[in-house]
Image (cartoon, helix red, strand yellow):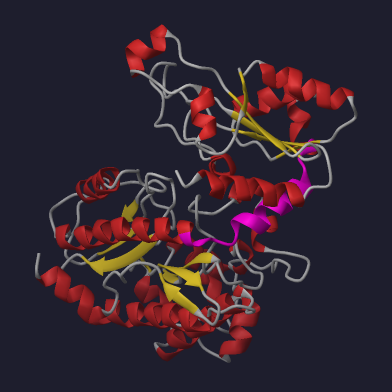
Amino acid sequence: MFNKDVYAKRRDQLRSKIDSGIILILGNGDAPMNYPANPYQFRQDSSFLYFFGLDYQNLAGVLDVDAGKDYIFGNDVDMDDIIWMGPQDSISDRAKKVGIVNTSEFSGLAKFVNEAISKGRKVHFLPPYRAENIILLGSLLGIRNTNVKQYVSIDLIKAIVSLRSIKDKYEIAEIEKAAAIGYEMHTTAMKMTRAGIYEREIAGRMEGIALSGGGKVSFPVILSIHGETLHNHYHGNKLTEDRMLLSDAGAETEMRYCSDFTRTFPVSGKFSQKQREIYEIVLAANNAATLATKPGVKYQDVHLLAARVIASGLKDLGLMKGDVDEAVKAGAHAMFFPHGLGHMMGLDVHDMEDLGENYVGYDEHTSRIDQFGTAYLRLGKKLEPGYVITNEPGIYFIPALIDKWKNEKINEAFINFDKVNEYHDFGGIRLEDDILVTDDGCRLLGDRIPITVDEVEAIMQNR
């Protein structure tokens, strides 16, 4: 964890943004896979980590806005726990490490919250995403489980988004560590890739690298020769010479900060002419988006810039036609690029998505564009120094989508469907980097994973 002063400062900043009442932030417990004693690997709630820093099960944190006090609620271990887990620090000792002196058994949380409610004080809490926390909040607040989300504090959401969006030097250093692990994961995938092996062999090695780095993968590894499926977690295909392999993966550090990279490369180790032509368009969109990323620029505009680069490149290949700006305005590019350019990243790979995507990615000055493809853009508002974002344009040939648009004559003024049919089994290409917005522009986080055609082919020739 960071120095206790870091957490104390964050809590003070949060308290200053809320008028009155108490702020309740629940930690997570274990989630059983198939019976209680066989849980999934534990993952603490990210907002709890941000303000309280304790990466342990079954804790709750409270900030008393009016009294200026902070509390940790949790139970000390008993002898049975020690037998299975070994000696553990007391809740009091753990709390002191993050600058908190007020602690209580977890059962004391109900009494604390009830007293606040009885005095007419507002209880601010975040949207729960785990069933057990929905049930707990319903019990604490005396409301039906189905109504819990109606009482979420919008003021608290906005306050936390404003704080967590700007990464400090300690967070950036952690993300750089995650990026270094991600670099090893992806370059290893490139070196392993060859015809005859299965996707799962590569995905397993990548996950092992993340584990050996002290954390785990920041999300389930996406790795497939069917890159046209955006989040493809199936790893049962055998690699063949004619295919490309899309690898989208990242790591968490011991402190749970993330990386998230995507590379696409030919199984043969050398791009065919057709593969290279599409790849170069995606790379051009990636580079153009990076150059355009700077404070004060709406990321929505950067997304549309990438869309124009993609549409222009596809027009040069005869896959699209007509005026590029009009094609993008009509959303014709989205048949090939049906997702947003990128998203916030930090303690979550899609940072703070549990708080509500519109609160994180949009504001009163920037609204989501309600159009297929661009509607999936998670981040649209103006960029600020300290934002950490991903930049991940792609081109995909999705047979079902192509057939639908062709049959329904959707955007036929801008798409040459006869030419597109030649790419029906092409797959998909995505290239993703992690970026820090700086005072006057941006910079890539970590060493850039090989991305040019020459770089990719060189590392694959040395397998």
| Membership of 154 in magenta stretch | yes
Stretch in magenta:
151-169
The structure residue drawn at horizontal position 20% and vertical position 51%, both measured from the top left corner, is 238
Q: Main secondary structure of the magenta part?
A: helix
Residue 317 is at least partly visible in this image: yes
The structure residue drawn at horizontal position 59% and vertical position 65%, both measured from the top left corner, is 377
| Membership of 150 in magenta stretch | no
Q: Position of residue 24 (x, y in %)?
A: 70, 34
Q: Nearer the viewer, residue 98 or 389?
A: 98
Residue 225 is at least partly visible in this image: no
Q: Position of residue 70 (x, y in %)?
A: 67, 35
Q: Position of residue 135 (x, y in %)?
A: 67, 23
- Quadrant into which the C terminus falls: bottom left
Q: Nearer the viewer, residue 429 or 157?
A: 157
Q: Quadrant of residue 69?
A: top right
- Quadrant into which the N terminus falls: top left
Q: From what the image shows, is residue 312 above or below residue 333?
A: below
Q: Position of residue 368 (x, y in %)?
A: 70, 66
The structure residue drawn at horizontal position 55% and vertical position 78%, both measured from the top left corner, is 439
The structure residue drawn at horizontal position 62% and vertical position 74%, both measured from the top left corner, is 300
Q: Seen in the image, is 377 located left or right of residue 121? A: left
Q: Nearer the viewer, residue 142 or 438?
A: 438
Q: From what the image shows, is residue 354 above or below residue 28?
A: below
Q: Quadrant of residue 363?
A: bottom right
Q: Seen in the image, is 92 located left or right of residue 271? A: right
